[in-house]
Image: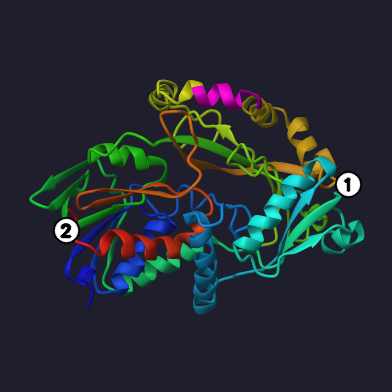
Amino acid sequence: MTAQGHQHLGIIGGGIVGVALARSLARRGAEVTVLEKEARLSQHQTGHNSGVVHAGLYYKPGSLKATLCAAGRVSIREFCEEKGLPYREVGKLVVAVDETELDALAEIERRSLENGVPDLTRIDDVSHLREIEPHVAGVAAVHSPHTAIVDYAAITDTMAQDVRAAGGRILLHSEVTGIRLENGRVRVITPLGEHVFDRVIACAGLQSDVVARLVGADPSPKILPFRGEYWELAPERTDLVKGMIYPVPDPRFPFLGVHFTRGVYDNVHVGPNAVPALSREGYTWLQISLKDTWESLRWPGAWPLAKQHWRMGVDEISGSLIKPLYFQKARRFVPELTMSDLEYKSTAGVRAQAWGRAGDLLDDFAVDQVGPVTILRNAPSPAATSSIAIAEYVIEHYLAATPA
């Protein structure tokens, strides 16, 4: 029995990271309660995820993202195999469309090899590109054949079954409105009642900085919500894409750019873009929170961020509002694509991107500790891929010791 087995632990947030953490703790014998503010699990980032199980191509070697992505990929595959959930290695092709992108592609290749991406290959022969993706355009690429696709909402629901089977509780409609530290324990207040825990771990995603403020943590980093919008390929045109076709990302920005992904149920979506959301949970332009928008605008990092990235911001917003501009971005990689092939905008997702007072967008995962409360402050992609590994990391590095 570990130290956690003698404690009542509260998990704030019912996304895949929170439920994976609850599952790991419950299986160790801990008394675990998950508090989720919505009517179901996975309603935000997890449920709007593209479903990609990342192999670790992009991340700085030695970073938490790189190490936990590698471990998490294996854990997610094993979990899906154990539970009979779909896990399809459709492969990813990162494509340089012209010679100007070759240096950046070489950097992706270097990072991939250093991160141990399995069976990665460099392709400089256009005919070889076409063997993998017959309709793609480009001069070179790196191919990750084991990049996979899953259903993260189904994985989360299955993990939740394990939590309950091990004696844990998952309480829905339980938005956390207050946190008080009392004699080394934590009182958590929700509309449905109060709970007292020995330790609390907050995996609150889009609300992570709000929860951090409740417990008196540093306001920085703050969450800046970015909406990613997807178009869906018409069913009769999904043969244009066999697996995943990705661009060479701009290293100055923490988003990958518009790409093609064949989903686990054989739909193909095109996207996402990255536009500032006008609400923490703003899945359309019509979902506006004046409070959230004002808090973002008055944050000290707002002006430095806008000054650095305003051109890209204008480009992304224009593509969101004007379909032909979005179409032109996608068509660079698949020249046979027509406007009518982009059939409809499927459900958008909102990424919880942490940013600091100086306007810097945090690139790596980040965790804070305030006494008996542990807060996951930044967990964007590849957090879903890394979820089981993140859970093990938090338990080992933050829960194993007695809190100060």
Find residue 251 and report its horizontal and vertical position in percent.
Answer: 64, 41
**Residue closer to the observer: 334 or 144:** 144
The answer to whether residue 247 shows anywhere in this view is: no
Alpha-carbon neighbours of circle 1 within 10 Å: few (<14), some, or many (≥20)? few
Q: Amino acid at mark 1?
A: Glu
Q: Which mark is residue 336?
A: 1
Instruction: Please say if 209 is above or below 84.
Output: above
Identity of the residue drawn at 44% across and 54% down: 42
Find residue 252 and report its horizontal and vertical position in percent.
Answer: 62, 37
Residue 309 on the magenta segment: yes
**Residue closer to the observer: 350 or 209:** 209
Find residue 30 and report its horizontal and vertical position in percent.
Answer: 24, 69
Instruction: Please say if 386 is above or below 119.
Output: above
Q: Amino acid at mark 2?
A: Asp
Dot placed on the residue nearer the N-terminal end, 1 or 2: 2
Q: Magenta segment range?
A: 304-311
Residue topped by disc 2? 198
Q: Quadrant of the N terminus?
A: bottom left
